Image (cartoon, rainbow, N blue to C red):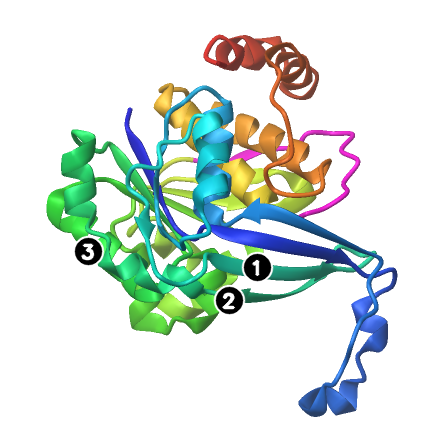
Amino acid sequence: MRIAVTGSVATDHLMTFPGKFTEQLIADKLDRVSLSFLVDGLDIRRGGVAANITYGMGCLGLRPLLVGAVGPDFAEYRSWLEDHGVDTSAVLESQFHTARFVCTTDTEGNQIASFYPGAMADARNISIKEVAACAGGLDLVLIGADDPEAMFRHTSACAMAGIPFAADPSQQLPRMDGDQTRALVDGAAYLFSNEYETALIERKTGWAEDEIAEHVEVQVTTLGPRGARITRAGQPPVTVPAVPGVQALDPTGAGDAFRAGFLAALAWELSVERAAQLGCLLAALVLEAVGTQEYELKKTAVAERLAAAYGPAAAEEIAVHLG
């Protein structure tokens, strides 16, 4: 199964604030916020939703196709991804710097972030039709947070070419109106979102929870420490609990890792329940590391942890595919 992942490729600047953001916010002054947080640490990491997802898939033994726009400063990052199994042949090099994500996390896991798009704005110049032709065909395209125009173009191109796509608008949802949100979601084979994003999709599209199932084949909602829920029309929801015993250090990238595990299991033609279990396992590994691509996948350790969380049958079905 040939899977392409479109979306941002970025450098993450991750900082930690030794307090609570909420204690610094004054309710009747929120229209005039002026705050500066003295942070304890700074980690500069590789990131971007598409790069994070393809990294996880590559570590699982697949050869995902990364589709995004980068700057002339991407050479070292490209080598890193290629060394971890990612096909970067569809990456477009722009004259602008690779996108940058700057994020501060407090002691409660709350985050305040800014994102500079840079080269990402040129992602709209990528043709999914040409990418598919060069790849010898695509079985699924995940359309992740990216330049908005690129997201619309990729969605339309998949629909016109009959290529199944997974809608994953995530960070770009706040800037979308109702028509735009419906355009990104309608007809998707899979819809990925967290609980808050799901509520936002419902509000913006005007579709009730049960109506979304009329527009997408499979809805996957991540539930944080409660795991994930898979919803399909005419079938009872499947809820998969999170991996227990996680010692979380940094929440950044956990959702991307979940998608990597889920997509890998789809490529192996496993059930959506197994896909969510592998997704939760990868999310746990990212939570226990600082940075989105700093975790390691060792087959024996992964199998043991899957067995402890979901039973030996789940571990056996998944571990046989691990690279």
| Residues at circles 1 and 2 in contact by the CB criterion of under 8 Å | yes
Question: Which mark, by number, is residue 116?
Answer: 2
Q: Residues within 10 Å of mark 3 (few under 14, many from 20)?
A: some
**Image point 64% across, 35% down: which residue?**
294
Residue at point 28%, 43% (across, down)? 165
| 319 or 61: nearer the viewer | 61
Seen in the picture, residue 267 relative to 225 is either above or below; the reply is above
Q: Please report whichever mark, 3 or 2, sits nearer to the chain's N-terminal start.
A: 2
Examine the rendered structure and indicate whether residue 131 appears above or below residue 262: below
Q: Quadrant of residue 82?
A: top left
Q: CA distance from mark 3 to mark 1?
A: 27 Å
Q: Which residue occupies the foreground of this view, 193 or 213?
A: 193
Mark 1: which secondary structure? strand
Q: In the figure, is residue 90 to the left or right of 129?
A: right
Give the numbered dot on residue 101: 1
Q: Earlier in the sequence, mark 1 or mark 2?
A: 1
| Secondary structure of residue under mark 3 | helix
